Amino acid sequence: MLYALLHDRADLRLFGYISFRMAMAALTAFLLALWWGKHVIVWLTKNRVREDVSKAPHEELVKLAQKAGKGQTPTMGGSFLVAALLVSVVLWARLDNLEVVLAILLVSGMAAVGFVDDYRKLVIPGCKGLSSRAKMLGLSAVALSVLLILCWYAKTTARASLLDLYAPFLKGPALALSTWGVLGLVVFVAFEWFVIAGAANAVNIVDGMDGLAAGCTVITAAALLVLCYVTGRADWTAYLGLPHVPQAAEMAVVGAALIGAALGFLWYNAYPAQIFMGDSGSLPLGGALAWLALVSKQELVLPLAGCVFVLDLGTSFLQTFWYKRTKRRLFTMAPIHHGLQRYGGVFVAREQGWHEVKVVVRFWIVAACGATASLALLKLR
């Protein structure tokens, strides 16, 4: 309504430009996160909604957290982060774009799963939250619902190419799943479920140090924002040999809102953290990153753009896999950021570990390198 009023009465077309709405979405989400974060921290502190560091998976991590006084830090900061993100998206993105609406549903659903997990940890004595199976079931229900709606939309609007998969080095689709019939739909849904669930769990694992998950999210989202904007431009995609997805450009507004909300949260989460994110923030952040990659048809580029998330998730998986079979640790500690903090090495313990701030900043640097490399792939086609 505001856009129509300004356009018709004042001939002001500023609100029609995606670049302007991207900037405003980022600023709106940032300011809302700053505003709400201040009040949420006070309320959580007053009601003693604190992180129970005794539930950390390693005894060494419990000692480190207790030494740093993190047992007094409130948690569930993801609540105001996600709220700022969603409000900004509703204000500045076009809601006649199905990809945007599905992004809202995906983030909201995963935030709900994370909230239940955090709530159980805080309310039920001795409870470690939802079981791994229950959490995965909740995430899968949300992800599959959104993916099935996307498949229905692709088929009913004759945009079956939305279901194709593209490789970073090929101009055409690597797998033209749209021509496979029912099998193509099954493969697409299964693969994208893996991407979304994997990204959500990866961000959840990275959320173990002050500012680490939020900072890496900002960097990865910036790269995916560019990919969405480029994919939505017919002239740029024709020149670069990329798949053209007209609706993807609008997702750049969602990416900008994600960056702004994460920066607003990082204001309070930077070392020493005034609040922790919790699953109510890490799960929807991962889902949002995966959705940006999915809409821009850059799912196979996501591991490079979010290399820190892949590194932490990979080391955790390999550590568990190796220990179950050999009863020995493959790495000093998993996820690897805690191994560097505690032992100062990946495979061999050093005399002294890295300070938490050093680990976080160096992982930000690695994330920036991966994001830059993912953008360089645009030209390799």
Image: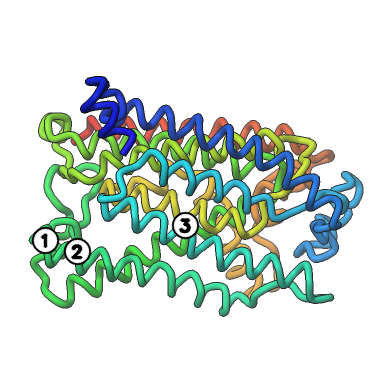
Which comes before the other along the chain, label 1 or label 3? 3
Residue drawn at x 34%, y 38% as measured from the top left: 252
Is residue 81 placed above or below 175 in the rendered structure? above
Residue type (three-letter) at the residue carrying disc 2: Tyr
Query: Is disc 3 surrounded by few (<14), some (14 to 19) or many (20+) residues within 10 Å?
Result: many
Residue drawn at x 18%, y 43% as measured from the top left: 246
Question: Mark 3 to mark 2: distance in Å?
Answer: 19 Å
Residue type (three-letter) at the residue carrying disc 3: Val
Residue 380 in the figure: left or right of residue 292: left
Residue drawn at x 15%, y 77% as measured from the top left: 182
Residue type (three-letter) at the residue carrying disc 1: Thr
Helix, strand or loop at label 2? It is helix
The residue to which callout 2 is attached is: 153
Which comes before the other along the chain, label 3 or label 2? 3
Question: Mark 2 to mark 1: distance in Å?
Answer: 6 Å
Name the spot of residue 361 as percent of width and height, x first.
65, 31
Is residue 282 placed above or below 212 in the rendered structure? below
Query: Is disc 1 surrounded by few (<14), some (14 to 19) or many (20+) residues within 10 Å?
Result: few
Residue 288 in the figure: left or right of residue 360: left
The residue to which callout 1 is attached is: 157
Q: Are marks 2 and 1 in contact (CB under 8 Å)?
A: yes
The residue to which callout 3 is attached is: 107
Name the spot of residue 178 as percent of width and height, x first.
12, 64
**Which image quadrant: the N terminus?**
top left
Name the spot of residue 289 as percent of width and height, x first.
43, 49
Residue drawn at x 33%, y 34% as measured from the top left: 2
Name the spot of residue 371 as percent of width and height, x first.
43, 35
